[in-house]
Image (spheres, rainbow, N blue to C red):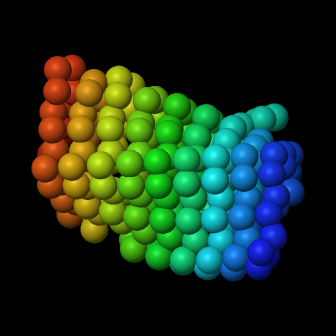
Amino acid sequence: VSDGGKTSHATLLGGAQHVLDGGEANSTTISRGQQHISFGGEAIGTLITSGGGTSGIQRVSDGGKATSTTISGGQQVVLKGGAADHTTISAGTQWVSAGGTATGTTISSGSQLLNGSAIDTTINQDGRQTILTGGTAENTRIEGGLQQVSSGGTAIGTEINRGGSQTIGAS
């Protein structure tokens, strides 16, 4: 999907979808394939699942953007310069590498791993946020899950509510 192109409701069962500069992918379902979002590309409303023992993967590269992704058994990888906004994790993993940014993530069950930056994350029961070396989490709200701040990680402005917990130190 390239400059000016749009696709909607594609299903990936083992192949790959490349969202390039100026391209837009809407409501893609990734079951066993991969979605690559490059500079200037945007994916909106992607559903990442796992099927047949293999998980779907969404990769957000430098200058790419993923908005309103739902992770339900697969993985979202936000690389340096990539951005993920309003991701919902119901199962599976969001990994934000150094230089990547995730904003407004909700973790209901599953995990967020941070070497990069996360802003305004909500951790619900059975959710886990792990801040690794070089990672930063700002304004996290813990509503029943766990925030693990490992050696070299930073948490700023965390709000811990009833049933939530924060652990600081080696993971």
Residue 66: image location, x then y, percent? 57, 59
Q: Is residue 147 visible?
A: yes
Give above or below for 125 relative to 24.
above
Give above or below for 70 relative to 95.
above
The image quarter containing residue 61 is bottom right
Q: Which image quarter is the N terminus in? A: bottom right
Residue 62: image location, x then y, percent? 54, 77
Q: Residue furthest top?
A: 163
Is 109 on the left-hand or right-hand side of 155? right
Q: Is residue 20 visible?
A: no
Give above or below for 169 relative to 20.
above
Question: Depth check: 127 or 62 in front?
Answer: 62
Residue at 71%, 64% (x, y): give it. 24
Residue at 24%, 38% (x, y): give it. 141
Give above or below for 159 relative to 144.
below
Residue at 39%, 74% (x, y): give it. 99
The image quarter containing residue 158 is top left
Residue at 61%, 79% (x, y): give it. 39
Is 135 on the left-hand or right-hand side of 59? left
The image quarter containing residue 167 is top left
Residue 59: image location, x then y, percent? 62, 62
Residue 84: image location, x then y, percent? 49, 58
